[in-house]
Amino acid sequence: MLSRQLSGQIDTSNNRAMNIALPTPASPFNIGTRGSPLALAQAHETRARLMAEFDLPEDAFAIVVIKVMGDAIQDRALKDIGGKGLFTREIEEALLDGSIDIAVHSMKDMPVDQPGGLLLDTYLPREDVRDAFVSLTAKGLDDLDQGATVGTSSLRRRSQLLVRRPDLNVVEFRGNVQTRLMKLGNGVAEATFLAMAGLNRLNMTDVPRSAIAPEDMLPAIAQGAIGIERRADDTRAAAMLEAIHHGPTGQRLAAERSFLAHLDGSCETPIGGLADLDGGSLRLRGEILRTDGSQVLADDMTGAIADGAEMGREMAIKLLAQAGPGFFDHM
C-alpha cells in the first residue's frame, strides 16, 4: 500500500541530499512518536518516505516511542485533564532536549500554539477526512434504536450526534482503535465513531464501518493529516522534511487551523472544519455547535488558495459574532 501512496507524490532524485549530512545506521535519525498502533503506522510512513527520497536503509532511522499523559489516562474526558496538549507535551520536550530529531503527530490532536523553538511545517499527503460510523449491530446512525448508547471521546462528535439524534445516550469512550472495538464487543456501547484515515492506515478492512459524508458530519480540523514537527534551528531536519512535504495538504490545513486558532479552539469547544482545493480555489466549510446539540452555526466560503488563512480568520469572527457569549458553555 505504501509504495502505491509514495508513487508520484515525492521526487525520488537525490539532488537534495548533496548538501545534507544524511543519517547512517551508526548515527540514525530519531523519529519520535506515541506508542499506539496508529501513531506507529504514521511514524513508519514518515520513515518510508524519507528512506525512498534519500535512498537510505531502514536502520538509518530509529523509531522512538514516547509515553504521553493522554494515553495513560483513559477513564476521563480530555477537557477534564488538560486537552490536546496531553498527546504532545512529552514528545515536544524530547524534541527540545535533542532526544529525537523530529516528531510525528496526528494533526487533529495538535494545539494551534507551539512551544518556542519548535516548528510544525511539514505535512504528508492527507488521507480520507471522513468520520466512520462503527457498530457490530447497526449499519448507520438512523438504524440505532431510540435511546441507544453511543460512545465517543470527541466533544465535536457528541454535539453533532445530539443535533441529529437528541434521544441518544452518549457516553465517554476513549482509547485507541483496538480499545474502542473491544468496548463495543463488551457491550459498553452499541456504536462509536472513528476516523476513516486511522482505519485505512492500519489496514483494518475487517472493521464494520460506514463512511459519513462531510455534509452529514463535518470532520475535526486537520482530520486525516500527519504533521511532522522539528526544532526551528535544525537545518538538516528542515532540508530532509522539505523533500517529503505535501504542499496541497499544507494549503488546506493553513485555512482550517487559522479557523481553529481564531475560535480559540480546544477540546472544550465543538468545532468542525474542512478545506478542499479545486484548481486555484479553496473552499472552506466550518461550524461551531452548542455542547448539548441544541444549536449549530455554520458557514461556507470559497476564495483563492493564497487567502485560505484569512478566510479561516474571517469565518471564525463571523461565527463568533453570531454565537454571542456563552455559546460553548457546558450544559
Image: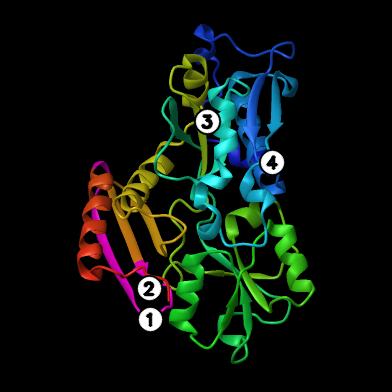
The residue nearer to you, when weighing 67 against 219, is: 67
Residue underneath mark 3: 10
Q: Is residue 113 left or right of residue 127?
A: left
Residue underneath mark 1: 294
Q: Which amino acid does label 4 sit on?
A: Leu
Q: What secondary structure is found at the residue carrying circle 4?
A: helix
Q: Earlier in the sequence, mark 3 or mark 4?
A: 3
Sort mark 2 into few (<14), some (14-19) or many (20+) by Cα contacts within 10 Å: many
The residue nearer to you, when weighing 238 against 75, is: 75
Q: Earlier in the sequence, mark 3 or mark 2?
A: 3
Image quarter where the N terminus lies is top right
Residues under labels 3 and 4: Cα distance?
21 Å
Give the residue at x 66% y 49%.
Answer: 71
| In contact (CB < 8 Å): disc 4 and disc 2 | no
In the image, residue 289 lies in the stretch drawn in magenta: yes
Q: What secondary structure is found at the residue carrying circle 1?
A: loop
| In contact (CB < 8 Å): disc 1 and disc 2 | yes
* x, y percent for residue 54: 60, 19
Q: Is residue 252 above or below residue 296?
A: above
Image quarter where the C terminus lies is bottom left
Residue underneath mark 4: 40
Question: Which circle, 4 or 1, is nearer the viewer?
Answer: 1
Sort mark 1 into few (<14), some (14-19) or many (20+) by Cα contacts within 10 Å: few
Q: What secondary structure is found at the residue carrying circle 2?
A: loop
The residue nearer to you, when weighing 178 against 18, is: 178
Q: Earlier in the sequence, mark 3 or mark 1?
A: 3
